[in-house]
Image (spheres, coloured by chain):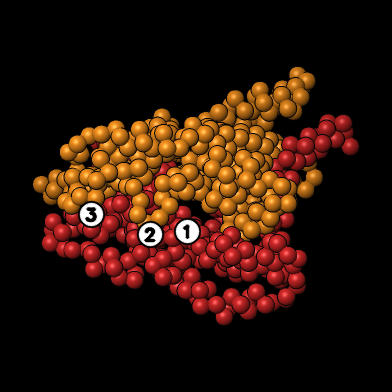
Chain colours: A orange, B red
Amino acid sequence: MKRKVSKILIYLFCVIVAVIALFPIYWMLINSFKPSTDILKYPPTFIPKVWTLKNYATVWNQVNWLQFFFNSIVVTLCVVFGCMLFSSLAAYAFAKIDFPAKNAIFMLFLSSMMIPAVVILIPQFVIMRNLGMLNTRAAMILPFFFGNAFSVFFMRNFFMSIPTAIIEAAEIDGCSPIRIFSQICVPMSKHAMLTLGLLRAVQVWNDFMWPLIVINSENLRTVPLAISTIFYTNRSVDWGGLMTASCIGLLPLLILFVLTKDYLMESIGASAFK
Amino acid sequence: MSARRKKNIITGYLFIAPAALGLLVFIFIPTILTFVMSFFDWKMVDTSTFIGWENYATAFNDPLFYNAIKVTLQYIIYHIPASLILAFLMALAIRSGIKRFSGFFRAVYVLPWITTPIIIAYIWNLLLDGTFGVINYIARGVGFDLQPVFNTMWWPMVSIALVNMWIFCGYHMMIFVAGLGNIPSVLYEAAKIDGASSFQRLMRITIPLMKPTFMFACITSLIGSFQVFDLAYGMYNGGPGDATRTYYFLLYTNAFKYFKMGYAAALSVLLFIVLMIATFIQYKFFSHDMVTDYAM
């Protein structure tokens, strides 16, 4: 009996937390379907009295969403591609190739993880300015294109688990290092790469401060930056429009999450223990 | 030197070259530049002048500097303990409390972590509005009007802390779930045979063995807390007054609103020192797991 009661209480706790986790997203969704005046009405309604798509029509035509999505997708894909490529190349070298000062260089890589983003923010901005790249998509891509220490660290751990015998056998057969990397090791590490790539993609897509600093023109804005600068300009916001824009902005992430939640959830544990 | 070794050396350096170059140009050189810039007066347009320690002196005489530290510390106190305790309870419930739907709950709890913080800030602005917000509607329904709470000076930072909890609880839960998975189950079996109650097992086995995981979560949240920006920007834009002008916000304002680049660089250096101490403590605690095991 006591066991049963505690079981019910635990389920109740789980359900309450789940409701809290989902409620803001639900609220955003239903308010995007309410007429703007209904949002400001008190008491608020949990299910719209009047369903309307007017917000979507207005918001979609108000700005060039396809342009913002294009910017976000280009930036995210480029960063993830570069980061995966260069990080795993370096990771492979650290894991499987012997060269002088390897451990010292690897320690140097690791030490860069201790430098917080806030410390390098200003010089990075100055470097971008001096390269004449401010207000370009390249400014959002280049600083993150060559990989980061965490990705190197993550992939190196994975490559270490590939038996050296496989690599040696390929070497004896006259396989070049780049082919061993691209045709043997990369296919074996698909799962690890997907985990890491998705984590990176979410981080880049959600980044707000860096685009805010380096981008000025409206047609170069990423989705989060566009929503913030266009739909939340002052305190007297059009909530219907803002919630609709938020829905449009979060939709790709929600779809991505539903499709790849196992990989994304795995990446959390990996970030702490790998 | 054999031809094979020579080839290995060249390949190795070629493979690490792009990543190393990226780290050098976009992390290590900027770090050095931050230190150099902190000794200059530079407003982006005119030439820079060397002013020695003056930027640091300015910081220590700037009431906004102390305000930013105060606000950031408040934020840390508000959310880290509560967030980690809740996440730990969630992890316990998910791992050992329930069997059915555990995968579903896990996914639901992690979902907020992948959402865009700046958008989340706006959604919570709507939820937490004093007059037509739904949270206050529910609170009034149970006989507790939150309007006076919303008007206090401490509420803005508390609400940012709460929203941050909403985003990160599931993330921390997953870290704790992984930590719980690392505890050998033989310990529990042995304790069960010896007649230990489930509460005793929690206090004597789970919590002591989870200490490193707690420390890890604590330090990473601490480092993250000093860099809170999106929520402060989206929910209150620094106000009311300077109540949500966190350290990162102060730095951002000085650098990109007033273009006091030298002063902002000095603020970065000061933060860097604090974070290095925090990181040092982290690595001291995790010297075995984190550095020696993986680096060598």
Q: Which residue is more in the foreground, B93 or B70?
A: B70
> What residue is shown with label 2?
B160
* Gap in angstroms between the C-alphas marked 1 and 3: 27 Å
Residue furthest to the top in view is A173
Counting from the top left corner in percent of width and height, residue B269 is at: 63, 67
Q: Secondary structure at mark 1?
A: loop
Q: Residue at x 49, y 46 (%)?
A: A225
Q: How many other residues sit within 10 Å of disc 3, few (<14), some (14-19) or many (≥20)?
A: some
Q: Which residue is more in the foreground, B23 or B49?
A: B49
Q: Which residue is more in the foreground, A72 or A185?
A: A72
Q: Residue at x 51, y 49 (%)?
A: A208
Chain assignment, label 3: B
Chain assignment, label 1: B
Chain assignment, label 2: B
> What residue is shown with label 3?
B132
Q: Residue at x 45, y 57 (%)?
A: B233
Q: How many other residues sit within 10 Å of disc 2, few (<14), some (14-19) or many (≥20)?
A: many
Give the residue type at disc 1. Answer: Val
Counting from the top left corner in percent of width and height, residue A150 is at: 59, 46
Q: From the image, which quarter does the N terminus of chain B lie in?
A: top right
Mark 1 vs mark 3: which is more N-terminal? 3
Q: Residue at x 71, y 24 (%)?
A: A179
